[in-house]
Image: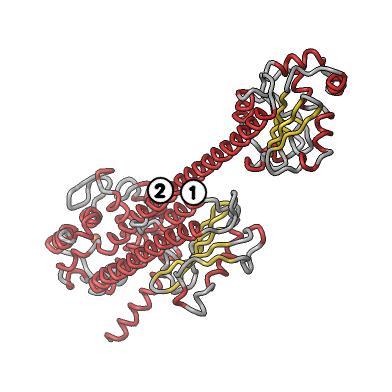
Amino acid sequence: MIRDQRMPDHPQAHALKDDTFKPLLQRAQDLGCAACVLGPTGRVIAALGTLDESTEHLLGSHFVRDHIAADPSLRDAPSPVTTQLIPGVFLLLVPLGVLDAADCKLLAIAVSAPPSGPQWESLCRAAQTDPQIASEALSRFGTTDSRALRLLTTALWGAVKDLASIHERDASLESFTNQLSECYDTIDLIYAVGRRAHAPLDVPGFLRFVIDRLHGASNFGWVGLCLDDAPAITTPLRGRHAFAGSIGDDALPALASLLTLGSESDPARAGAAPIVLPFAPGLSSFMGEQVLVQHIVCKHRSIGVLAAGAKHGVDRVMSSYDIQILEALAGYISGFCESVWLYEDQREMFLGTVGSITAALDAKDRYTFGHSERVAHLAHRLAIASGMSPQAAERVHIAGLVHDVGKIGVPEAVLTKPGRLTDEEFAHIKKHPEVGHRILKDIPLLRDILPGVLHHHERIDGRGYPAGLSGDAIPIMARIIAVADTFDAMSSNRSYRSALTREKVLAEITRSAGTQLDADLAHLITRIDLSGYDALFAKHSKMESMVTQKAA
Ligand SMILES: [Fe+2]
């Protein structure tokens, strides 16, 4: 155990581990001399717990300190030196600079015979120790001659260099372990991000995940991601951003200002290696001295930036390792954005095709012009309001679009008949959910919406068709479409009646809650925002009157 660091007269000595000098002091004792470590001012900063008190007093005495300080060849010696303190008492001084303890020295004391006499007594008085006890204590280590003293000096110098070599190996091993650990964290990060990048539906969730994981696995004080909010960017990506660490949403304008960096003057540069900014124009100082910026590239243009800064730790300068991590992650984010954009393009194309077919069907009857699109809109709103995920609500929207596709087999004369339908005609119309189901059932992309099509005319009390299902046995998608369908039918003119007012429609919906319609959904539609529906309705009315005028 190191007994004494009571003289912390040098900050570097403080920083050393407690057991830094223990092997060295132990080696000196094994070689037959008492030793301690002196700090830069000559005071004892470390000694073995087994060293007797009188010897320690001697080594730490101002007599010894003054003797060393008075002689530059001792004080500043770059290699081991010996000196005679008083006749027969020798000091060995070994500099410890090679142990990263600059200005510290190993001090050992050896005697040629048990010391005595006036000079010895004077020395012991200065050290406030008993001459007899101190003499006996030193003699226990043995006596030395000039040859043994040289050998001792060589052995201690060798011990210091051995220790330095061990420290160096320890430091290399620690550095290697740290690098290995960093590599593992990075591989884990890249792997986790790669796995998530294949699901293009949850854009905010993915971006949040990347930013949080990057911040957690790196030494960056902050990381941020900002996607362009230009109208040309596909809606799910437009203007998205995420931050972690010491910056927040207030940094968005500064981060957005980096979007044009390198890509405006030279579009080919966008997506090349990350850019290290020695200072970031427009970014306040809290973002750190260096900011690392990497463009997110999609459809051959920069659509955003991934940035990081305020690096902390031993090395605060952005390294090639930091650059590689950002580059790899930006690659995954770019790939993810490409998938989102592609998915959105396909979705729009699909919805456009489905919309065209259903619009053509609705147009067979001027009274149902735009009906499917409005039902789809309302059903989507209801789905979101009832707590469905955006993905599930999207499917409800599609089901709303195609819910009446089975009417394609019903003659136009029946659909537009102004008077009362015959039993036969009504039976024909009642087949449209099953006909629709048959038409769509072989389209893999629409398989999950079939229950919405087949059962949208079921009633909660079991008196609907085609299966006569009741209550929760009716699929939720079908219950939602039923409410939206009923709402739009009553809000529109029909060949046999005029449109009802909003007030009457809502009253009728409420009255039907629990009998015809799902009670919760019926009440929900009275509380949702209908402005989007009204805008659609106005658009369809205008289109319908234009078509009617043209026909006339
Ligand atoms: Fe229908």
Asked whether, in this view, residue 289 is left or right of residue 518, the answer is right
**In the foreground, 133 or 428:** 133
Q: Position of residue 455 (x, y in %)?
A: 22, 53
Q: Position of residue 276 (x, y in %)?
A: 55, 65
Q: Specify the quadrant that holds the C terminus.
A: bottom left
Mark 1, other Cα within 10 Å: few <14 / some 14–19 / many ≥20: some
| Residue on which the image places disc 2 | 188
**In the foreground, 47 or 218:** 47
Q: Relative to 27, is 237 above or below?
A: below
Q: Position of residue 473 (x, y in %)?
A: 24, 44
Q: Position of residue 426 (x, y in %)?
A: 16, 61
The three-letter code of the residue at mark 1 reads Ala
Q: Specify the quadrant that holds the N terminus.
A: top right
Of the numbered discs 1 and 2, the one sitting upstream in the chain is: 2
Residue 282 position by quadrant:
bottom right
| Residue at image coords 31%, 57% | 396
The three-letter code of the residue at mark 2 reads Asp
